[in-house]
Image (tube, rainbow, N blue to C red):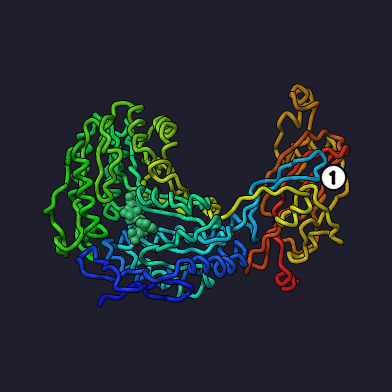
């Protein structure tokens, strides 16, 4: 008898009760596995995530969680061969599996790298600068993010069994929130195999990941306000789950990625014979056929100038005619099967619906060549192109999603019409514009961006390196308004924040410094007992402050700096011209001279643990420095970020340059790399 898929619950693999439902191969209809989650205790699953998984993950800093994800991604890269082998059963070609498996693993690498580069090596994430709230600066505000204390429930669609899980898992784990993954049943066997490998790696702490293959039972009854649901699937299911009484009463965060009638607009300049016309034909064909069109981001609506619609249809039909359909394990195949025969029947029905308002101009046949497979047993479907003559008054082409290799040409006469057609999709995940006219690009983006989560503009200059219309990237937001679900995932650190709570803190600068581990102006300035540049990373304390001696800026200094650097801008060299400037009374010091003098005042020249200055952030010149003014500097250790395993950490110094009247003339953060104890001891 075919194997039952395992459920990973409470860190053990368990089978559900009963025989379960048979999952059939998309290629030959044979049984691949059986699926059931009957008998699982869903309350226990949630409780385990919260108490064991969450507790374990929250012990780690953002950087440690990032390191963990990197190790996991590396491990999965070494174990992907068997995933590729099984993936063909879902109907995926090698190229499709590459998007799902390698693409999925790469989202972990990106989540890891973003966490280590853009988040602190800490447990709390500060959201923006502090807000001054009082006259004397003793009471301030600061927004922070901390992990929610619940579980991330991930309900995924069938089309990307690996990517769909990993793109959500990365941000949740970086946030410090354990995940409970429920893959779509029809392709759950591939997700299960990947979770088995993840579990076998031993890289994630106990409770960080659980897997439910089959129904979610009464899981929703146990949700609370600390849990998060990230759903991918059809709009109908999203609406049903979003209205679950527990989701409503507990205000459970719910992100939905649903149907999307994505459009691609061909600019009026992109006539046949231009590179953009050819790019468009290739892009549409690729979007229709990759993953057999089962991509939430695929181009469903081809919005093209009416004058060239006929030629476009001809060019698309020619390229679609070259697509070889068949057994995805055969490397000569361009397009495999849909995920199941049920899915194929569903797509057929949707094409029938579309046909009431558009005519099939390519494909749509039930009898077509299938290579190396039995067409009657597999879920094969011919790429099908439709043409709608009156798209502004046809509703089906803007609302019926045939989740397969199906797309419709919608002609337009003016850019306003193209914009209106795009908007008729009522909210999309992805949109694209193919034009070499930047004015057209701007007009179309301003007209349609509010209806899109992501837009890509392609022309001859970027096409070779473009990632294409349909590829969501972990660095960029994935999600869209309206029909697309109104949700948002990924987008680097933005995606991590969905699993965290933002809290506005109010208190004294000293208290908020202690909580956020970042020195805030107004907090205590500690006497470091020695020049702070003589301290190693470990010895430095947030708040360690150096007050420098004063230095006078002379006219000769300004003239020398102008000659030496070549910056002879009139404000530094021409007394009369400078005085005419509304901001100055006469010649003033260069901003960079102020910064250079400041460095001359605060550095400790001798060989020491400070290894390098790698930049400044947030540099502002608050008011002019006239010659004969006297400058001094306050330098305070603001934030420490250990770069584990490198021998150094990054230290950010809050820097304030003031004049003889104690007025601030410049403010910025100096960024340095400082050796650890071990590294410093090894080089002395
Ligand atoms: P679906 O029927 O809505 O299923 C989506 C997921 O919800 C599956 O895991 C399904 O599990 C689960 N589910 C269904 N009913 C549930 C319930 N009562 N309680 C808990 N979970 C439940 O969608 P589909 O037909 O599989 O997927 C195709 C649709 O997904 C298309 O419309 C496509 O546009 C959309 N999609 C969107 C994106 C995106 O990122 N926006 C990506 C891919 C697909 P079972 O499989 O076990 O029923």
**Which quadrant does the N terminus fall into?**
bottom left
When the figure is inspected, residue 374 is found, relative to residue 482, above or below; the finding is below
Residue 587 higher or lower than 258, as above or below: above
Q: Residue furthest bottom?
A: 1
Tell me the quadrant of the picture where the C terminus can be found. Answer: bottom right
Residue 537 is left or right of residue 498, and the answer is right
Q: Locate ligand 1 by image quadrant.
A: bottom left
Residue occupying the point 59% across, 54% down: 118
Task: Please name the residue shown 40% across and 60% down the image.
Answer: 163
The image shows residue 612 at horizontal and vertical percentages of: 70, 58
Residue marked by disc 1: 632
For residue 280, say whether it is visible: yes
Q: Nearer the viewer, residue 387 or 279?
A: 387
Asked where in the image residue 219 lies, by quadrant, the reply is: bottom left
Quadrant in the rendering for residue 67: bottom right
Image position of 599 (left or right of 253): right
Q: Dot 1 surroundings within 10 Å: few (below 14), some, or many (20 or more)?
A: many
**Side of 428 where 636 appears, left or right:** right
Note whether ligand 1 is within 8 Å of mark 1: no
Q: Residue at x 35, y 35 (%)?
A: 422
Looking at the image, which is closer to me, 533 or 414? 414
- Numbered-mark total: 1
Q: Quadrant of residue 447?
A: top left
**Residue 319 picture location, percent across and down:** 21, 47
Q: What percent of the width, then of the height, locates residue 250?
A: 53, 53
| Residue 314 visible in the picture | no
Q: Secondary structure at mark 1?
A: strand
């Amino acid at each position: 008898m075919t194997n039952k898929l395992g459920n990973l619950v409470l860190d053990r693999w368990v089978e559900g009760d009963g025989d379960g439902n048979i999952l059939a191969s998309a290629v030959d209809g044979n049984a691949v596995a059986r699926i059931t989650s009957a008998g699982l205790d869903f309350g226990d699953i949630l409780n385990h995530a919260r108490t064991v998984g969450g507790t374990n993950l929250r012990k780690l800093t953002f950087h440690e969680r990032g390191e963990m994800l990197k190790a996991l991604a590396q491990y999965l890269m070494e174990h992907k061969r068997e995933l590729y082998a099984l993936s063909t059963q879902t109907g995926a070609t090698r190229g499709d599996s590459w998007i799902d498996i390698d693409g999925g693993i790469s989202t972990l690498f990106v989540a890891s790298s973003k966490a280590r580069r853009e988040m602190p090596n800490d447990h709390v994430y500060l959201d923006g600068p502090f807000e001054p709230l009082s006259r004397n600066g003793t009471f301030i505000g600061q927004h922070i993010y901390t992990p929610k204390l619940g579980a991330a429930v991930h309900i995924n669609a069938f089309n990307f069994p690996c990517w769909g899980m990993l793109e959500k898992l990365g941000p949740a784990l970086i946030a410090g929130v354990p995940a409970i993954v429920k893959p779509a049943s029809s392709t759950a066997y591939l997700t299960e195999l990947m979770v088995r490998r993840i579990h076998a790696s031993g890289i994630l702490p106990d409770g960080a990941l659980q897997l439910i293959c089959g129904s979610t039972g009464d899981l929703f009854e146990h949700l609370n306000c600390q849990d998060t649901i990230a759903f991918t699937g059809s709009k109908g299911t999203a609406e049903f789950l979003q209205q679950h009484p527990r989701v409503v009463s507990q205000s459970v965060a719910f992100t939905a990625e649903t149907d999307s009638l994505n459009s691609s607009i061909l600019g009026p300049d992109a006539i046949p014979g231009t590179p953009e016309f050819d790019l468009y034909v290739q892009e549409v064909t690729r979007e229709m056929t990759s993953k057999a069109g089962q991509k939430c981001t695929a181009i469903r609506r081809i919005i093209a100038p009416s004058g060239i619609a006929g030629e476009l249809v001809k060019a698309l039909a020619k390229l679609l005619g070259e697509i070889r359909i068949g057994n995805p394990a055969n490397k000569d195949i361009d397009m495999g099967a849909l995920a199941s025969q049920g899915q194929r029947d569903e797509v057929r029905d949707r094409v029938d619906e579309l046909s009431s308002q558009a005519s099939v101009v390519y494909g749509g046949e039930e009898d077509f060549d299938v290579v190396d497979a039995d067409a009657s047993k597999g879920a094969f479907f011919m790429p099908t192109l439709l043409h709608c003559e009156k798209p502004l008054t046809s509703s089906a082409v803007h609302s019926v999603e045939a989740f397969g290799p199906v797309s419709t040409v919608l002609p337009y006469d003016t850019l306003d019409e193209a914009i209106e057609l795009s908007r008729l999709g009522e909210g999309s995940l992805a949109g694209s514009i193919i034009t070499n006219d930047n004015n057209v690009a701007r007009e179309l983006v301003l007209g349609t961006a509010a209806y899109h989560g992501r837009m890509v503009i392609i022309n001859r200059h970027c096409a070779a390196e473009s990632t294409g219309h349909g590829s969501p990237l972990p660095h960029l937001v994935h999600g869209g308004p309206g029909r697309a679900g109104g949700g948002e995932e990924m987008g680097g650190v933005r995606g991590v924040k969905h699993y965290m709570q933002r809290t506005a803190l109010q208190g004294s600068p000293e208290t908020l410094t202690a909580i956020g581990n970042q020195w805030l102006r107004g907090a205590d300035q500690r006497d470091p007992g020695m020049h702070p540049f003589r301290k190693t990373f470990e010895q430095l304390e947030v708040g360690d402050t150096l007050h420098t001696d004063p230095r006078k800026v002379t006219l000769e200094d300004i003239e020398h700096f102008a000659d030496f650097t070549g910056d002879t801008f009139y404000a530094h060299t021409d007394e009369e011209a400078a005085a005419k400037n509304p901001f100055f009374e006469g010649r003033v010091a260069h901003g960079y001279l102020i910064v250079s003098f400041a460095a001359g005042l605060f550095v400790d020249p001798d060989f020491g643990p400070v290894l390098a200055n790698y930049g400044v952030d947030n540099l502002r010149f608050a008011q002019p420095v006239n010659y004969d003014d006297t400058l001094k500097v306050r330098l305070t250790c603001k934030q420490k970020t250990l770069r584990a395993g490198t021998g150094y950490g990054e230290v950010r110094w809050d820097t304030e340059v003031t004049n003889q009247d104690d007025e601030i003339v410049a403010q910025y953060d100096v960024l340095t790399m400082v050796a650890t104890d071990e590294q410093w001891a090894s080089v002395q």
